[in-house]
Image (tube, grey):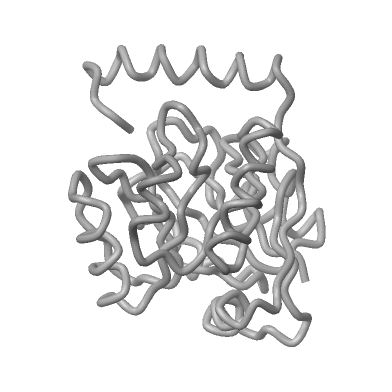
Amino acid sequence: MRADLHVHSTYSDDGRQTVAEILARCKELGIGAVAISDHNVMEAHKEADTLGSGIIIVPAMEITTEAGHVLALGIREPVARGLPVGETIGLVHAAGGIAVAAHPYRAWSGLGEQNVMGHDFDAVEISNGRSKRIGNLRARRLAKRMCLPGTGGSDAHNVQSIGRAFTEVPDSCRDHEDVIKAIMDRRCRAFGSGQGTSGTAGTGIRSVLRWFRRGFRRM
């Protein structure tokens, strides 16, 4: 089963796809599970649960910490933004979720190698559809060095990008808890190479413009 474990909806201020559009696209592509991990909010998974799509909805959120982004999978309530990395991970665990180091080598929002190695992460995102290919390769090496499972997600902000990176989990998964257990048991594989130079440049320009509009505040 393919699971796209990093997707953004219009509940994120940079997302351009509705929850219904995300689920329709996942169904079209044969994706069996999706984590709509909006920035610091969790309304999307509640809406997704009401749509009855037949797709496994992994409740998730991309949390902005003091140092960069943490992907929380399996939580049901939001975790506060702006906290130290270690405190954020502790809150994710207390909420019953797992903490994934999102795109660790991304210049604008990645945690960086030392922040990942210095904290109790459960997994590392090793295939991100919007990251540079070299960043994904380095993330894969980092996960191996730390003996952690690796996840994949498109980081899609529009329907065309869904599924460009994903996590393969066993077809026997029936709910989000099964998906998370498969990750923790290392019964998963991440696929997707990431963006080339031109795609990354475009993403960077858009990120800078949004940063200006937010008053120089981190996403």
In the drawing, does residue 179 fall left or right of residue 88? right
In the image, what residue occupies the spot 41% across and 34% down? 109
Q: In the rendered view, does 127 fall on the left or right side of 216? A: right
Which residue is rendered at x = 41% and y = 14% of the image? 208
At which x and y percent is residue 165?
71, 48
Q: Out of 34 and 152, give the one closest to the viewer.
A: 152
Q: Is residue 110 left or right of residue 217?
A: right
Judged from this view, the residue extending furthest toward the front is: 145
Give the position of the N terminus as an image quadrant. Answer: bottom right
* Vertical side of 56 occupied by 23: above or below: above
Count all numbered tags in the image, as a single digit: 0
Q: Nearer the viewer, residue 188 or 20?
A: 188
The residue depicted at 51 percent of the width and 55 percent of the height is 36
Note whether residue 23 is visible. Answer: yes
Image coords of residue 98 (percent x, y): 42, 70
Q: Is residue 4 left or right of residue 64?
A: right
Residue depicted at x 40% and y 43%: 11
Query: Considering only vertical position in the picture, is 212 above or below 214?
Result: above
Q: Position of residue 32 (x, y in %)?
A: 72, 68
Residue 143, image quadrant: bottom right
Residue 205 spot, x, y in % from top left: 51, 12
Where 7 sits versus 67, above or below? below
Which residue is at the front of the view, 138 or 151?
138
Quadrant placement of the C terminus: top left
Residue 46 shows up from this direction: no
Residue 145 falls in image quadrant = bottom right
